[in-house]
Each structure stands twice: as structure tokens, then as C-alpha cells.
Amino acid sequence: MADVAARLTILFVCTGNVHRSPLAERLLAARLPEARVGSAGTRAQHISGMHPATRSVLEQLGGNGAEFTSRMLRPELVAEADLVLGLDREHRETAVRLWPVALRKCFTVREFLRLAHGGAAPPREAISRAAAARGSLAPVSGAADGIADPCGAPYDVLLACGQEIDGAVATLAALLQERGRAQGTEC
């Protein structure tokens, strides 16, 4: 296993930190237990938990929702993360406003996956390459970069959102594991 200092810290960001970012956090943590994975919300209510229906979806997808507490996105969370992944552009932009020097490590989940493809590289180098690739690919719509908020939607919409996040997280985990192996370490 990689040295603790070499592990990645990944922060997922959504609006309330009760649906999308907790799903992404817990699903990635299950796939990459060696990485430090967290989440926060741009408008989270302190000390609220994961929505019960979201926890049900998470468990259906193989994640663990135990002891989750939502938290507000703060500058120090952005500063401490190696990679900040918003569930839509608004979340990425809020993270950058809180800690402007973090621009090169803040993406939406889908944006990062689109920009980080390509040859094997250590995870931190992949993040740098993704930042450098901004502007070199054809622009996409904001909707194409985001995952829709299921807040207030019926359970089947929440489940579809969870499945969409699970697919993105599976791709992210595979990308980071592959790149960690290329470096000779894990994330």
C-alpha cells in the first residue's frame, strides 16, 4: 500500500450534501479505500445527515451510509484536497471562489473524466494534465458536465441519479487505480 502522504484526498461537492456528493463520496471510498474521500455542500445544513432515500439507494449500490454527516463547503476543505469534483459547474465555481488558487484541481466529475483520459500517469500528474487540457477540447454544455439534482424527485429519479453517479465513480476509480499502478503506488 502507498505511503499515507502519497494518498489522494478527493472532495466531492454538491448543493445540500445530502444526495449527490454523499453518494459519490461513499461509492468512491468503497472502491478506493486507500484514498481519503470526503464531501461537502455549497448550501449544506450543518449536522444534517444523508437523506434516508439516498442512503437506501447508496446501500442498494453497495455503499455504506453509516455515520454520514453533511457539512458546508469551506475554504480549508478545498485547500486540503488534491482533487475537488463538483456535481455540476456551480459547485466547481463555488469551490474556486472560496480558494482561487485551487482552479487547477477543481472540475466537475464528468469534466475531469473527459479531460483526464489518455496515457498512464501518476494520479497527481493526471490532475495537472486535466487542468492543462482545459480549452483544448470542444466545449460542452453545462448539462453535459453535470449530474442533475434529485432533490424532491421521486425515488426512481433518485435511483437513476445514483446509478449515474456510480458509473462515473467506477470510471474515476479505474482511472486513478490504473494511474497509481503506472506510478508503482496506489492512490
Image (spheres, rainbow, N blue to C red):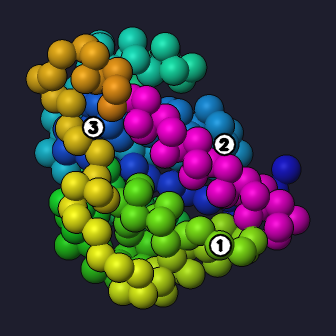
3D distance between C-alphas at marks 3 and 1: 31 Å
Horizontally, residue 139 falls left or right of residue 42, namely right
Asked whether residue 77 appears in the rendered view, the answer is no
The residue at which mark 3 appears reads as 17
The residue at which mark 1 appears reads as 118
Name the residue located 83 percent from the left edge and 60 percent from the top edge: 181
Q: Secondary structure at mark 1?
A: loop
* Mark with earlier residue (3, 1): 3
| Residue 52 spot, x, y in % from top left | 29, 13
Q: Is residue 66 magenta?
A: no
| Residue 68 spot, x, y in % from top left | 40, 26
| Residue 86 spot, x, y in % from top left | 33, 55
Residue type at the position of mark 1: Gly
Around disc 2, counting alpha carbons within 10 Å, would you say few (fewer than 14), some (14 to 19), or many (20 or more)?
Answer: many
Name the residue located 55 percent from the left edge and 57 percent from the top edge: 9
The answer to which image quadrant residue 161 occupies is: top left
* Mark with earlier residue (1, 2): 2
Q: Is residue 106 above or below residue 4?
A: below
Residues under numbered marks 3 and 1 in contact, where contact means CB atoms less than 8 Å apart: no
The residue at which mark 2 appears reads as 32
Q: Is residue 62 above or below residue 169?
A: above
Q: Secondary structure at mark 2?
A: loop
Name the residue located 39 percent from the left edge and 12 percent from the top edge: 56
Q: Quadrant of the C terminus?
A: bottom right
Q: Secondary structure at mark 3?
A: loop
State the residue in front, 36 or 143. 143
